[in-house]
Image (cartoon, rainbow, N blue to C red):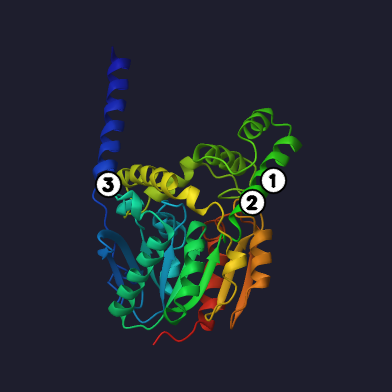
Amino acid sequence: MKIMLRLLTVIALALGVSLVWLLWPTSTPAIVDAEGTSVFGSIAEEEWVEVNGLSQWTLTRGRDRDNPILLVLHGGPGAGEFAWFRAYNSNLEDGFVVVHWDQRGAGKSFDPNTPAETMNLPQFIADIDVVVDHLRTKFGRERIVILGHSWGSLLGTMYAAAYPDKVSAYIGTGQIADMTDNERVSYEFALAEAIRLQHQEAIEDLTQIGPPPYSVDATLIQRGWLTEFGGGLTHDGRSQASLARDALSTSEFNLLDLTALVRSALFSMDHLWDQIGDINLDQTYLSFEAPVFFILGRYDNQTPSELAEAYFNRLTAPDKELFYFENSAHAPPWEEPDLFFDVMVNQIKPRLLPDR
């Protein structure tokens, strides 16, 4: 009886903690100095912005409002990433005013009633322009920095080429080049690794789905094995549970957000995946008026770095540089955060176009 009571007590406590974690309101803390005093001239705020008929969530943080504005375009589609940038890259706020934006149909902006006809690439580029203009007006700038990760690199590349007068630099990480080649090379890598390791379950799964193009469900199967073999989101094999724990350690993200993130990623993939399967940036977007920087993981086989490097070598820009992160796969900012900070603040920031 005592053992049963103890077990029930433990279960009740666990449920209570989970409920608090689920319902605890999120907020973003002030940026403070060593004494705990809010830093003069800093900014730390969440804001809902009206973007082409939908209210969309943004998080803006920076130690000095006069620093360059950095708009982060998250991956996915539909996979808001601010919690991981906050968990691993909060020091970026010392060198930039960092703006995270959950896009149409993503994360905190997710609404299952988002009109399906608005889930298309031209709409997303138009949304970016509204957000960029909002930031330019709010901070009195002519240009801002665009950082695109994965799906966000597709959007960022297209936006930087279309609106050069509003961009002080484009930075791509997990950079997409040619979607058809990306998926083909990614699949071939996963299958070759499965065969090399004699991993029968992986061989069976990958053989069954076959080479791309394939459905969203098949894509998720391929991505799972890609991550297992060190070529997916991270090279170090950190688990989904570990990534979730790190995101939940931030004050802006709770279990409700995690649930919304999963739902929004599936929603966005269902609406957008078929639209982007034949996108070929390295044939269409080759000339830029702002500096261009690629930050690539040596082991990235989700958006294979060899293809991104070939794209980089073909494009023209007034200033450009490619940085390889030797211990990363698809998410260099999270896998090598100290190096990412150094590259962003000490090597890229001095080379931005003037923003005033």
Q: Position of residue 66 (x, y in %)?
A: 36, 82
* Kind of residue at disc 1: Phe
Which of disc 3 and disc 1 is earlier in sequence?
Answer: 3
Mark 3, residues whose alpha carbon is within 10 Å: few (<14), some, or many (≥20)?
Answer: few
Numbered mark located on residue 189 in the image: 1
Instruction: Indicate which label's residue lies in the foreground, 2 or 3.
Output: 3
Amino acid at dot 2 = Asn
SS at badge 2: loop
Residue bearing mark 2: 301
Determine contact: label 2, label 3, CB under 8 Å: no
One can see residue 300 in this view: no
**Type of the residue with mark 3:** Asn
Picture layout, residue 27 above or below residue 36: above
Quarter of the picture holding the N terminus: top left
Quarter of the image for residue 40 reads: bottom left
- Locate the C terminus and report the quarter of the image it occupies: bottom left
Which residue does the numbered mark 3 point to in the structure image? 113
> Which residue is nearer to you in this view: 353 or 9?
353
* Residue 103 picture location, percent across and down: 36, 58
Residue 148 or residue 227, whichever sits in front = 148
Q: Residue at x 69, y 44 (%)?
A: 188
Q: Residue at x 57, y 70 (%)?
A: 285
Name the residue nearer the viewer: 312 or 346.
Answer: 312
Query: Quick one: which residue is furthest to the right in this view?
Result: 196
Q: Is residue 102 above or below residue 225?
A: below
